[in-house]
Image: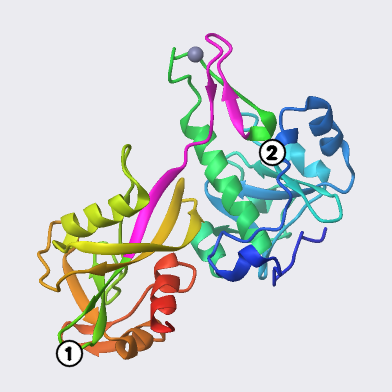
Amino acid sequence: MHPPNDRHPTHALAARPNAFANGALDRLSGKRADAAFLDAARADPNGQYCVLQAGSVLVNGDGAVWLGPAAASLADARMPLIFLGMTADAAPVFAISLPKRVDIAESMIAGLGDMLDMRAAATRLPPNDLSSVGAAKALFEWHDRNSFCSVCGAASQATDGGWKRKCPSCEAEHFPRLDPVAIMLPVHTDADGVERCLLGRQARFPNGMYSALAGFIEPGETIEEACARETREEVGLTVSAAAIHSSQPWPFPASLMIGLICIVLDDAVTLEDEITDVVWLTKEEARAALSGGVNTPQGKVWAPPPFAIAHQLLHAWVEG
Ligand SMILES: [Zn+2]
C-alpha cells in the first residue's frame, strides 16, 4: 500500500514546520456520526490502515506502513477502529491498535516493518504520516484511560469513528481530552540594546539541553495570561507582552503546545523548583545552540531538536 504521502505540503497553513502538524487528510468530522458512511469506508478496498501498539507505530524506513482493510482483523477488540479521514484521491484512512501482548514478529504483519516509539517516529516520518499516527496515538490513549463514564461510572462505548464515547446508562457524551500548554521563549533587551533569550533546564532533560519554559493553561486563563503566570512562577520574570508564534499537536499523551515569544521587563531570574538552571543567549549564541551547541559558563548548551516546538520558537527569534 502507498501512504497518503506528501513530504512537502503546499497549503498556506503549513508555513510552520512543526512536527505532528500539517497533515493533508480531510478529516470529514461531520461524517463521523454517519454509520452508513463509516460502513462504506470500512468496506472500501482502497482503505489505508496504520498500525499502533502501546504508543509506537509500525514503520518501514522513513514512512509509516499502510496496510489494506484486512488489517482491521488485527485490532485490539477493546479499541475502536479510528477513522482519520480521506486522502485527496478519496481513500479512507484508519488507524488500528494492536493488543499489547501481540508480538508482531509472530503475526501476519511480520516482516512489513518495525514498531517505532512515537518520539523517534517524529524525527523520521513525513508530515502526513506523522500527523495521522500522532492523532491516532492521542485517541487510543484517551480510549485506554477512559473506559468508564465520568458521570455515572458505567462502562462507556466508543462511537463516531473513535472520536467520541457514549455512556449507555446515563447517555453522557465524552470527547477526546486535549490539554493546552503555553510554551514560551522570554526575550529581554539590556541597557546597551543587546537582545537575549532565556532558556531553562529541568532535571529530567538530557545533559546540556536547555529549552523554552512551559506550563499547562488553566481554566479561567487566556493563553497569554498563562504564559505570563508560568514565566513569573518558574523564573520570577514579569512579562510585558506576548505573541503567539504557532502551535503543535503533541500526543504525549494529549497536549496542544501553543508557542509564544514574550518580552520580559528585566533579567533578574529567581528559580523555583521545576527549573534548575537558566541561560541567557544572544542571537549568535542561540544560533550555535540550535546547530550543535554553544559554550557557556554552565558548559556546553544545546537546544531541543527540530521536532520540538521549542526549537522552532528559538529558530524564529534568531532569524527575526
Ligand atoms: Zn454515564
Q: Is the C-beta of the residue carrying label 2 under 8 Å from the nearest atom of ligand 1? A: no
Q: Could you tell me which secondary element the residue under label 1 belongs to? A: loop
At 70% from the left edge and 71% from the top edge, which residue is drawn?
Answer: 7
Provide residue 236's location: percent of width, then percent of height.
13, 61
Query: Which sits in the foreground, 210 or 107?
Result: 210
Horizontal and vertical percent for residue 41?
Answer: 83, 38
Question: Residue 288: in sight, yes or no?
Answer: yes
Query: Which quarter of the figure is the N terminus placed in?
Result: bottom right
Which label is found at residue 29?
2
Place of residue 213 in the rendered image (x, y in percent of width and height, measured from the top left): 28, 63
- Residue 113 against residue 76 in the figure, above or below: below
Q: Which mark is residue 318?
A: none
Q: Secondary structure at mark 2?
A: helix
Relative side of 127 to 16, left or right: right
Q: Give residue 152's quadrant in the image.
A: top left
Residue 172 falls within the magenta-colored stretch: yes
Mark in the foreground, 1 or 2: 1
The residue type indicated by label 1 comes to Asp
Query: Magenta stretch: residue 165 in it?
Result: yes
Quadrant of residue 184 within the rendered picture: bottom left
Residue at (46%, 32%) from the top-left corner? 145
Q: Which mark is residue 192?
A: 1
Which residue is depicted at the point 50% across and 58% down?
248
- Examine the rendered structure and indicate whether residue 304 appears above or below residue 112: below
Mark 1 to mark 2 CA distance (whole Å)? 53 Å
Stretch in magenta: 163-184
**Front-most of residues 90 and 221:** 221
Give the class, few, some or many, for how many residues have Cα within 10 Å of label 2's Cα (few <14, many ≥20): few
Residue 179: x %, y % from top left:
42, 44
